[in-house]
Amino acid sequence: MWIRSRFLNRFSPSSQTSFAIYLTADFAQVTSLQNLVARFEGRIDEVNKDLEEIHAVEEAQAQARENLRKKAHRISLAHQHSKESHPGITQPALQPHPPAGSQPFAFHYVGPPEPTDTAMDVPPKNLKRRRQGGDVGNSSNPVREHREQAVLSGGKQRKNGSSISSFYSEPSSPKEKGIAKSPERRSRSTATAKSVAQESDDLNDDDDYGSDTETVEALYESKRAPKDETITQVMTLLNVLVEKVNNLLENVPPTLTTVPKNVHPVVAQHLVASGQRRPPVPKDNFMPWNQNENDNRPACPVKRPVERVAALAYVRVAFATCLGRKSKKDPLPPGPPDGVAAPTRQEFWVRWLEPFNSDFNTAACGIVTRQIMEDFPTLFTENCFEDLFKMVAAHMKYNILLYRRQHLPAGDISEAKRLAAASSNWRRHTIFQKRIYITSTVKALRRHRRLLNDLGIDGTSSDEEDPQTPGLYKVKRIKQLSSSVVQLKQKLDDAYEALVKVPNRKGSRGRKQVRTAESSSRKFRIKGLPVNCVNRIWYNRLSSVQKDVFRFADYEYDFKFPDEILKM
């Protein structure tokens, strides 16, 4: 937490708010994913409970089968004893036959039809009830058939007609999706197992000869499924469920737009984005010229995504922490002492006099990258290592240049020149954006939008502050452009001052610029301009090969400008 608070304190309140919103969205989506995993773990726990219920049902089935075998054995002995006690009466006998298929054994009637009840020594207890129900040998009791079917099915069939295996298949309706099993359904399954055991006890207590015979016939003459069929189905469905969970966790939907992606996939997408805060480099446009068509190419600065800004910010924090710097104003530490072959986390060094991609400095970049990934394991995965390493290497390159500037000898003016060039370059960007803005605001000036886009930053005149007169900037013209282009750009600047920088409007006034005869020393690389947009003298000095390289357009550009705008 101290790392996070220290990290956020380095930014302005607005930046802290943006990054806090980003982290909040990240943690919220991570929490949502954790809830999803917990829900599936709950489903797996329910499956385990159902497996226990299945085992209980199977044990009850086994106990019922054992009781029925004992009952059948007693019935057989009773028939044999009755035959020996009454030799004049022919009794139906039950003789065991060899097992058929997967059946343990099977009983079949042998002998004449069943005698009347009066010929038996011990009449059945429910003789009256059986006679009322119909024929004794073919009586059909719906309640008893239902109980026998429950014994055969082992409690797998639920009251609503859905089996345990079908419960773990895909939900049949959206309402059933994602709903955990209720306690009523769980107690219902437990009650099924108990009912099977209770029924087996009832069968043991029932001495009814006819009902025992019906039960034996229904149990051993019906074709039963293999013993482990239910378990196999449940395990198969469990495997399918596990595969779906894994696919869901691996293929996180792109709607997780700020999951830092493990960097969830969204930070990974923004890590590879260029995202420099500069206008895009204009590509050569060789389309036919037509000033009546609007040029909609983007010319505004491309802002870095919030995720990339946060990653770059922590790269700076992590690098400074490894170096032991508490503030960006602190001087950089010296290089490693002699004898240090490679940096470590405990002894972190940078060789400032070597390039950033040397073996020693590359190892240092790897240490910082690994530290960042360990600090945010849910943000960055191994797939993000290469992009993070590039960020760290770029920051190390900057720090190497900073170290060399901090150790310049006294009286060196190279740093002053660098700052002046950077300021001039920034002013060119500012002027370019003002011209793009005025052409987008005034409809009559949109016909000049393509020319500005093709000229780009390289076609914008640079100005330098006069050292003799601070606040006065001398403009250096681009000698390759015609005077008509120079006048057009000057009018666009004046229109911006007239329409935007009014006295009652907030904002700084324009700089005082003085156009001189000095020319810019930058190379001219712009291609595809109309012939009348370039300087005629410079154009005539070009060879045929050079003209082919620049690919000038055979088009007469119209520099028409509504001067009434300047009078507003």
Image (spheres, rainbow, N blue to C red):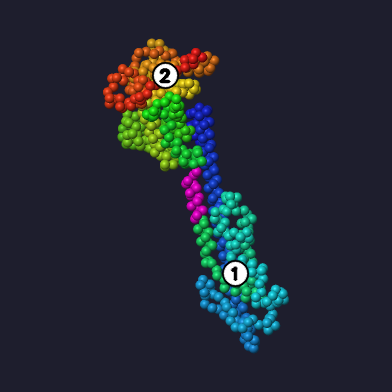
Near mark 1 (Cα within 10 A), the count class, few <14, some 14-19 or many ≥20, is: many
Residue 355 visible in the displayed image: yes
Q: Does the magenta segment cover residue 485?
A: no
Placement of 219 over or under 2, stated as above or below:
below
In this orientation, which residue lies closer to the viewer: 39 or 475? 475
Residues packed near mark 2 inside 10 Å, few (<14), some (14 to 19) or many (20 plus): few
Which amino acid is tagged 2?
Phe
Measured as percent of width and height from the top left, residue 395 is found at 39, 31
Taking the spot 68% from the left edge, 76% from the top edge, the residue there is 135
Q: Which mark is residue 64?
A: 1
Q: Is residue 533 left or right of residue 446?
A: left
Magenta span of residues: 239-253
Secondary structure of residue under mark 2 = loop
Q: Where is residue 355? Give x, y as percent.
A: 32, 31
The circle on residue 559 is: 2
Identify the residue at image location x=44%, y=29%: 297
Q: Main secondary structure of the magenta part?
A: helix
